[in-house]
Amino acid sequence: MRSAQGGERRERGSSVMAGNTARARRRGSLLTAALVLALLLLVCWQLMSMRAKLDAARAEQAAMEETVARQRQENRSLEAALERAEDPEYLQELARDQLGMVTPGQKDFYDVSN
């Protein structure tokens, strides 16, 4: 009888061990799945963050390109003014229009009715 009881105990013990192993496997696979999901979420968050930074950098680049275009236009205008700066007629025109100067003997009249 002893051998029958001992065998029965061993069978119960092995089935309990098999149940524990199956639970441990399930627990391990759930933990692995949760870890993979967490890593995927982290990667997605990082990608979204990088996308936002990229969009901001592109907007800043567009603004800078617009500023450069305006500065180039202003430089061309200033270069043209420098080229005309030695022209006596242009200088007289500037003196007359911006400074209100007149040549000797010239009379300047202002309309005060307005």
Image (cartoon, grey):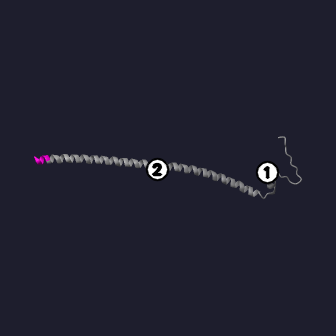
Residue 110, quarter of the rendered image:
top right
Q: Which mark is residue 62?
A: none
Q: Position of residue 46 (x, y in %)?
A: 46, 50
Q: Main secondary structure of the magenta part?
A: helix
Segment colored magenta: 1-5
Q: Position of residue 28 (x, y in %)?
A: 32, 49
Q: Earlier in the sequence, mark 1 or mark 2?
A: 2
Q: Residue at x 37, y 47 (%)?
A: 34
Label 2 sits on what residue type? Gln
Q: Residue at x 22, y 46 (%)?
A: 16
Neighbours of disc 2 within 10 Å: few (<14), some (14-19), many (20+): few
Q: Which mark is residue 46?
A: 2
Q: Which mark is residue 98?
A: 1
SS at badge 1: helix
Q: Position of residue 27 (x, y in %)?
A: 31, 47
Q: Position of residue 105 (x, y in %)?
A: 89, 53
Label 1 sits on what residue type? Gln
**In the displayed image of the protein, which residue is found farthest to the bottom?**
86
**In the displayed image of the protein, which residue is found farthest to the top?**
113
Q: Residue at x 36, y 47 (%)?
A: 33
Left or right, residue 114 beside residue 74: right
